[in-house]
Every structure is written in structure tokens, then in C-alpha cells.
Amino acid sequence: MAVRRPEDDDLRKIASEFHFTIPDERMPVVRTLVDGLLSPYDRLDEIDEQLQAPRHARDAGAAPLPEENPLGAWAWRVRIEGRPDGPLAGRTIAIKDNVAVAGVPMRNGTVLLDGYTPDEDATVVERVLDAGATILGKAVCESLCFSGGSHTSDSGPVRNPYDLDRSAGGSSSGSAALVASGEVDMAIGGDQGGSVRIPSCWSGIYGLKPTWGLVPYTGAFPIESSLDHLGPMARSTADVALLLQAIAGPDGLDPRQHAGLATGDYLGALGGGAAGLRLAVVREGFGIQGLSEPDVDEAVLRAGRAFAELGARVEEVSIPWHRDAMPVWNAVALEGATAIMVAGESMAHGGKGRYATGLVDAFGAGRRANGDRLSETVKLTVLAGRWMSEAHAGRYYAKAQNLARTAAAAYDAVLGEFDLLLMPTLPLKATRIPAADAPLQEQVARALEMIPNTAPFDVTGHPAMNVPCAMSEGLPVGMMLVGRQGDERTILRAADAYEGDVWSPPPP
């Protein structure tokens, strides 16, 4: 495409946005100088990018038929066979639809990306296929992944396998529903405020948000670079460990990853039992005003007592920062998502990573043509996030990022004495899916209310896992196990011990 040049009014508009003016008599010179700065873009436009061709053959697949999609969880059906051998051979997997699969449409839950098909596989897609898995399709996710409910995707609601009138949780809604219903063995989910753990909890499966940077985010649509995570979801701890083993580790392309973060033998952590583990029951994770349901709190406290019966040391602790970490996450998410996910056209400047040029083109065009089709949660995020950035010049985003380290240190202080933190994953059971004409306040509440326990660990980066621990009123309840940075092994050891010796969720 030809590189467009600005008109005088375009330059005046930009100048106004940055609070300076261009005198009329100087405009011809300014325009000429700007044109000189833009001229190298003409050559850049002529140079072809080198794309990574898919390593595994596939066809384009097709949209799911209604009778094939009773939960509304499939975004696209395709069958891509991985290697004939490998640790995931014989396992089927769904890929959240914010993750690129070459040659397969990607919508990220929004009509703004209608018609976009990635040219390259995300790193996690390459890795699961290299490990022998069979991809059966793309799983529905919420619009731009900015919702903990399962009612905000433009394709329609994803329904909870245990109660079709209730939310499956979001934003990895389709991933959880497909795993819980047995349509796939495992799935890839994404997590910026709880989006692996929320649907895992409400759909009664196991879901792990790894340490920030452990799993490469390359090829996934971002929300905010310091919050972005991808993680495994499955019906057992063993399958979570198996999938994590396949996808973890640096790819050299994701600036979120750092050299000091090592992978581990996650399968080797299984079978170690709970004896000798030290678990801290975090008081601030219970009794959340206006949200916590007594049966959820009691079920998780009962799970803590079960760990004690298995030989673990279990004590209640107080971490006041757990409640204050939520405002920290809020500032990072609102201002960061506005700058990167929306205004940045899904692209964070400054990182030496692999950029999806086609995605930037498609989303940029879609956002300008169909901005009214953004979800209500995203619209509100943009309004609040841009206002705070403009009205306060970004100081609260900067302060929140600084305080994120303080919050992390508060958790680390307790994790210096204990192996794991324990609390409810979500303070309440799955809520009813709002009607299509429900008031805006109800739609937004059902999308964002459930995150007080999950979001803090996105901003601090600690690994955290949903472990199903009870059924109440026919709906799953989950406890969350949180470990030290880089210590997924201890989380998996404890989850496996609880699953093997105490309780596993019944099928829906």
C-alpha cells in the first residue's frame, strides 16, 4: 500500500493533540520537512517481511454448525494433526481465539476482526503440534478478552456445561466449556485478570496461569504486556502439567520473557503428596463484601482442612496488600489496555518481538469502521483509561506499576515461610447469563465483578491455579493455589495430591 501523506489539517490535529500549534506561515516548511521524514517509509513498504511458514499441514476448516455447537463454545472447526509421536500424541486440544493459527480465521470475540486470517502460528500452537497434539478448532473468547463473564462475545453467549442458563466464565469461555464437556482433552487459555482461572472455576476444570513470561505470548492478541499470560486448561492436574511441559520456555521472540526464568519438570512434580507442604490460608481472600457466598468460602476452608489431614501444615495468615493489589491492577489494566489493546491497534511499542502486521492492519481498519461494535466493557475501559492518561498525564499508571512490586513483595514475604497461598478462586458461583436486553449496569457487573482474588496475581506475575474442590447447588466451586515466582511444580504437586486423595469434579 502507498504511504499516505498528511494534509495541513491532519498536522494541525496532531499538533493540537500534543498541545502545540503550527503557525500558518510555517506550515509549508513543516509539511516539507515531515514529508522528508516519511520518505523512507516508501522503501519500507516495498520490502517483504519474512514469514514463518506453518510446520504442520492443515486446511481452512469451517464455521461450526449449530448442532455441533450446543454450548456456543466453538468459534471455528478445523483438524490439524501434530507429529505422530510426542508427549501429546493422541490428545485433542482447542485454541483460544485470541491465539493465531495460520490459515484459520481469528476473531478474538469481535466482529472488528471479521475476515482476518493469520499467516503464522503462535509459538504455543507450534509447540503443541510439535508435541503431537491434534487441534480440533478455535474456542470462543469474549470480545477482545475483556470480560470475566461468558456473555460478551459477538458470536453469542457461551453456556456453562453444568447449567445452560449460567455463565461458563471468561474470557477463555469456550476453552473451559469444551474441556469440561469432554469435547477436547485440553485447551490453551489466556489470562490478564483471571481469564484462565475464572472459566476453569465456574466450569469445574483445572486451569493454571503460569508465572508471567514462562509461556511465550508470541502470536496472541495482547491486552497489556505486563499482564498478558497464556496457560493450560484440562480436566486433570496431570494433563495441565503435560500441556505446560510442552508450551513453557523462551522462544526468543517475546519480550515478556526473561533469561532468569527457568522451566521445570512439571510431570515429575506429580505424586509427591501433600505431606510436609506449608499452606497459608489468606484471610483477605474470603468474606469479600457484596460478593462472597458463604458456601464458597466454607468449601474452600474445608479444602484447607483436607490438606491438613493429608499431612500439610495449614495456617491462616493476613496479607492486607491482597485487597490493595486490586486497585493497582485496575490502573494498569485500564490505562494499559487502552494504550496497547485499542489505541495501539494490538501492538505494544518498544519490544523486540515478533509483530503480526496483518493483525494490526485488520484491527486498525475494523476499529475505525465499526467502533460502535466494541463491547460495552471495552468502551468503558477506553473512556476511563484515556481520561486518566490525559487528565493525570499517566502518573497513576506509573505509580501502579511501581506499587505492583510492593504488592509482589507482600506475597513473597509470606511465601518465604509458606509454600503456597490458598483462597477461593472466585468468591461466588457461576452467575446467570444476562438477557440480551439487560440493563448496561447488569451486563457490566456480570463481566467484571468476580476478579478480586484472581487479578492481583496477573499484576504481580505469581503462578496461580484453579483446583475444583466442591459442588454446591449443582455448580462447581474452585480453590486457588498460588506459588512462588517460577514454582509451578509445587502448585501442581499440591493440586495433584488433592485431586487424587480428596475430590475430583463430577462430569456435567
Image (spheres, grey):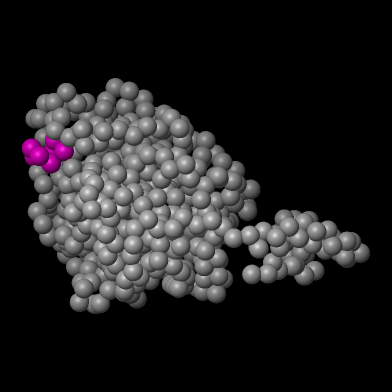
Q: Front-most of 101 and 273?
A: 101
Q: Is residue 501 magenta?
A: yes
Name the residue: 23% across, 41% down: 241
Q: Is residue 225 left or right of residue 307?
A: right
Residue depicted at x 67% and y 59%: 44
Main SS of the magenta part reads helix
Quarter of the C terminus within the rendering: bottom left
- Magenta residues, start to end: 496-502
Left or right placement of residue 198 versus residue 385 in this view = left
Toward the viewer: 160 or 72? Answer: 72
Q: Is residue 197 above or below residue 302?
A: below
Residue that extends furthest to the right in the rendered view of this protein: 25
Based on the picture, tell me whether residue 3 belongs to the magenta stretch.
no
Residue 31 appears in the picture as rendered: yes
Image location of residue 229, percent across then percent down: 39, 47
Say which quarter of the image contains residue 276: top left
Instruction: Give the x, y percent position of residue 89.
Output: 21, 51
| Quarter of image, res 399 | top right
Front-most of residues 98 and 432: 98
Q: In which quadrant will I find the N terminus?
A: bottom right
213 vs 41: above or below: above
Number of callouts in the render? 0
Q: Residue at x 71, y 63 (%)?
A: 42
Image coordinates of residue 202 in percent, x first then y, are: 22, 55
Q: What residue lies at 49% left-to-right and 35% top-to-bottom?
A: 403
Q: Is residue 38 above or below residue 105?
A: above
Q: Give the camera-side residue of 36 and 382.
A: 36
**In this picture, residue 227 sits left or right of residue 414:** right
Residue 235: x and y in percent read 17, 51
